[in-house]
């Protein structure tokens, strides 16, 4: 069986112009990722990891090349369609959580369901069950500034996963956490992967990277290596 990859990049480049200088954040990257894979993306600071994730997450567009998500060429989609696809298929977890500060944990997780037009009763049920599952039910009414870093990141993961996306992208999700909270966060991400979600984690942490089944290393915007990690 030759299943369509969930993600396919063909010769993707992304450059930024800064004054007279052009920075090649991604330079001719081709990558194929199957459904349900667990991939670590590693590489030095400035090697293009976040740029890659932003493109995969449809937060940014390539300057050249094609990005097929589920076989659909996203580079041909108008912005509004692209936003719809992102909303339905992509979950994003960031190093600094990016929660809405004036909303409670419950409301942060509920937000994508409101955007999707899910009815209030079903929203309540789904958010409650997501918070329960992540051990956050007693924090539902807390705002982000009333939560620890680890709790904030768990809320962010609940929000990213609530729409049951096909792909979960995490950009240094443990980069701002102590090691115990970081380990919790990774356990949660891996549990989502075990349920079939495609998981792509950018990390600086070699131990963490080694837990993924495949590691892609970047250098200067290019793929330096792409290998299965030893079991
Ligand atoms: P990493 O996440 O691996 O640290 P990035 O993808 O953030 O690297 O950045 C790759 C390169 O692209 C860096 O040289 C960075 O300075 C540059 N870059 C990233 N985003 C922008 C931007 N919005 N404007 C200009 N340059 C950028
Ligand atoms: Mg980065």
Image: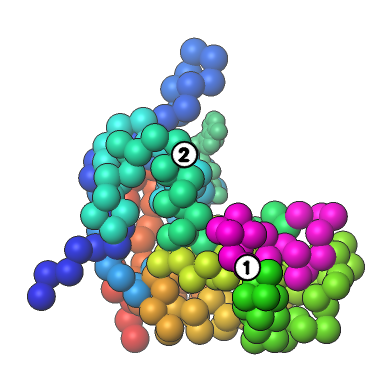
Quarter of the image with the C terminus is bottom left
How many neighbours does mark 1 have within 10 angstroms: few (below 14), some (14-19), or many (20 or more)?
A: few
Where is residue 163? Give x, y as percent. Answer: 53, 67
Where is residue 39? Give x, y as percent. Answer: 39, 68
Q: Quadrant of residue 152?
A: bottom right
59 and 206: which one is in front?
59
* Drawn side of residue 40 relative to residue 74, left or right: right
Q: Which mark is residue 57?
A: none
When the figure is inspected, residue 132 is found, relative to residue 171, above or below; the finding is below
Residue topped by disc 2: 80
| SS state under label 2 | helix
Is 109 colored magenta in this rendering?
Answer: yes
> Spatial distance from mark 1 to mark 2, Cα to Cα?
23 Å
Q: Residue at x 36, y 61 (%)?
A: 216
Span of residues in magenta: 100-119
| SS state under label 1 | loop
Q: Quadrant of residue 66?
A: top left
Colouring chosen for the image of the structure: rainbow
Q: Which mark is residue 119?
A: 1
Where is residue 193? Give x, y as percent. Answer: 44, 78
Is 112 colored magenta in this rendering?
Answer: yes
* Drawn side of residue 48 relative to residue 147, left or right: left
Q: Residue at x 27, y 68 (%)?
A: 34
């Amino acid at each position: 069986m030759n299943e369509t990859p969930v993600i396919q990049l063909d010769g993707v480049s992304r450059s930024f112009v800064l004054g007279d200088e052009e920075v090649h954040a991604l330079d001719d990257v081709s990558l194929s990722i199957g459904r349900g894979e667990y991939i670590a993306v590693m590489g030095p600071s400035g090697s293009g990891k976040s740029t890659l994730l932003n493109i995969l997450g449809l937060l940014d567009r390539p300057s050249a090349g094609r990005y097929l998500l589920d076989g659909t060429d996203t580079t041909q989609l108008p912005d509004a369609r692209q936003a719809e696809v992102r909303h339905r298929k992509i979950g994003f977890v960031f190093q600094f959580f990016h929660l809405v500060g004036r909303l409670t944990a419950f409301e942060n997780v509920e937000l994508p369901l409101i955007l999707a037009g899910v009815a209030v009763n079903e929203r309540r049920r789904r958010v409650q069950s997501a918070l329960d599952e992540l051990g956050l039910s007693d924090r539902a009414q807390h705002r982000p500034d009333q939560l620890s870093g680890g709790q904030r990141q768990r809320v962010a993961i609940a929000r990213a996963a609530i729409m049951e996306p096909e792909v979960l992208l995490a950009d240094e999700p443990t980069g701002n956490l102590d090691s115990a909270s970081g380990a919790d966060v990774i356990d949660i991400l891996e549990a989502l992967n075990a349920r079939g979600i495609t998981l792509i984690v950018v990390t600086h942490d070699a131990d963490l990277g080694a837990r993924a089944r495949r590691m892609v290393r970047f250098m200067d915007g290019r793929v330096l290596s792409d290998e299965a990690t030893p079991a």
